[in-house]
């Protein structure tokens, strides 16, 4: 019985070691592919250059928040509303939330963030993308 537990613990330790060792490579492999922003269509059904989605993206830097880097990438053209949970982005480069039912939402490596931009501290080589989209 003791030998079985010892073997089980060794297997568990080996599994954890392998998982930790491949984690950085796994994050890189699972990154979302680059996408081009969608283009809206006018009443005739043809793409309209004026309504192209104004997405914004940048790479993370150590010891910076997603908000710090957004301000720099948008040349300080960021409007916010402060709540108890953090800063909510209300406009970037003059494009305001609510326009055509769309809002600014940020993504980390292609996945929607689960916290405010001012509380999200960048890690490694993550890619931050701000999408002006209709919330789901």
Image (tube, rainbow, N blue to C red):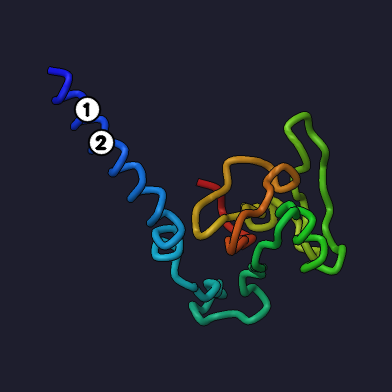
Q: Residue furthest right?
A: 76
Query: Which mark identifies residue 130?
Result: none
Judging from the image, what secondary structure is the residue with disc 2 in?
Answer: helix
Judging from the image, what secondary structure is the residue with disc 1 in?
Answer: helix
Observer-nearest of 27 and 57: 27
- Asked if residue 122 lies left or right of residue 32, the reply is right
Q: Residues within 10 Å of mark 2 (few under 14, many from 20)?
A: few
Q: Position of residue 48 (x, y in %)?
A: 60, 80
Query: Which mark identifies residue 6?
Result: 1
Q: Position of residue 6 (x, y in %)?
A: 22, 27
Locate the N terminus and report the quarter of the image it occupies.
top left
Tag 2–tag 1 contact (CB < 8 Å): yes
Residue under circle 2? 10
Query: What's the residue at 66%, 68% (across, down)?
Result: 58
Q: Position of residue 74 (x, y in %)?
A: 79, 67
Please, is residue 91 above or below residue 136 in the view?
Answer: below
- Asked if residue 3 lies left or right of residue 70, the reply is left
Residue 3: image quadrant is: top left
Query: What's the residue at 14%, 25% (across, down)?
Result: 4
Please, is residue 65 above or below residue 74 in the view?
Answer: above
């Amino acid at each position: 019985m003791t030998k079985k537990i010892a073997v089980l613990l060794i297997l568990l330790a080996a599994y954890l070691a392998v998982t930790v060792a491949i984690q950085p490579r796994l994050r890189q492999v699972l990154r979302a592919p680059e996408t081009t922003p969608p283009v809206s269509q006018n009443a005739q059904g043809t793409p309209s250059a004026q309504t192209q989605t104004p997405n914004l993206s940048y790479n993370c830097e150590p010891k910076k928040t997603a908000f710090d880097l957004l301000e720099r990438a948008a040349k300080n053209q960021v409007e916010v509303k402060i709540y108890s949970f953090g800063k909510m982005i209300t406009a970037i480069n003059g494009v305001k939330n609510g326009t055509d039912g769309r809002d600014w939402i940020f993504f980390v490596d292609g996945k929607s963030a689960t916290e405010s931009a001012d509380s999200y501290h960048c890690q490694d080589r993550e890619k931050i993308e701000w999408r002006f989209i209709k919330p789901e």
